[in-house]
Amino acid sequence: MSRADEIYRATCLDILENGFWDTDLQVRPKWADGTPAHTVKKFGVVNRYNLKEEFPIMTLRRTYWKSAIDEILWIWQKKSNRIDELGSHVWDEWADENGTIGKAYGYQLGVKHKYPEGEFDQVDRVLYDLKHNPASRRIMTNIFNHADLHAMGLAPCAYSMTFNVTGNTLNAILNQRSQDMLTANNWNVCQYAALVHMMAQVSGLEAGELVHVIADCHIYDRHVDLVKKMLDNPMYDAPKFEIDKSVTDFYAFTKDSFKMVDYQCNKFDFEIPIAI
């Protein structure tokens, strides 16, 4: 069975059995009918995925991994905030009248900063250091820019990546302030696992471990029954992950540079209410 399934199932069960309900608190998110969207949560969840063993995609339900990778390329490659430059519609609710999500996500990664070696944006600084300073303990990005929060459609959820090279292996830590377990967890895990593979390949390294640190790991009240039903599904082996080995330039990757061979998963035909 997929290791990602095991981790996901254990995390959800821990939340459902031992989590804290915020029912008595005022919360920002709301359902489409205006009702407050409450959650049951666990604080400080840490999940580890060994990318050398398998790609961390769930089989308990289908993860639309190509759309997830398309979004990570939109953020990290295009450094875009325009929703018309994204293949999916996951950001439509947070777009402004100009069709952007403001100074969020890709916008922050594209801002250039001065360094002794010259000017780099955050992505190009990572790529430079992985090749020229692999022993550095400062290879990281951070898009939670307090000065620009007022101009963002949504404050970043997954906000920081820390890269660390050990021998010929690239490991990374993804820091996330908030995680909706039903709609976003494996989506984020897959896209950042793919990012580690991309960064490793163009830097002459091997992808190692992805550590996912979640401050507020939660299940929304209207998602609880859906999660319980999903956890009863059978679990299958992880598919074989393939990446186009001919790509040596990070900016040459596309969503078609990847394959999931023999991806077997369960159908999930339930309509999922979305909290905004």
Image (cartoon, grey):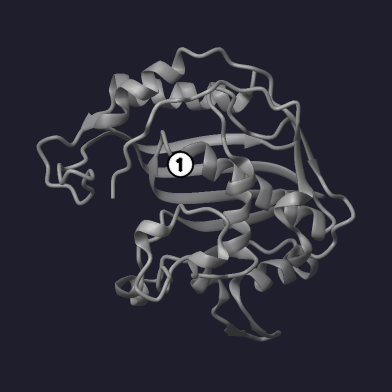
Q: Is residue 239 above or below residue 140?
A: above
* Residue drawn at the location 37% of the way across and 18% of the way down: 228
Q: Amino acid at mark 1?
A: Ala
Q: Residue furthest left?
A: 24
- The N terminus: image quadrant: top right
Looking at the image, which is closer to me, 8 or 213?
8
Residue at position x 31%, y 21% in the image = 225
Q: Nearer the viewer, residue 230 or 139?
A: 230
Q: Quadrant of residue 128?
A: bottom right
Q: Give the side of residue 181 with respect to residue 132, left or right.
A: left
Q: Position of residue 274 (x, y in %)?
A: 32, 42
| Residue 125: percent from left, percent from top | 66, 73
Residue 59 rendering spot, x and y as whole percentages = 59, 24
Q: Mark 1 Cα within 10 Å, few/some/many (few <14, many 20+)? A: few
Q: Where residue 143 sits in the image (x, y, percent)? A: 47, 66
Q: Is residue 60 left or right of residue 52?
A: left
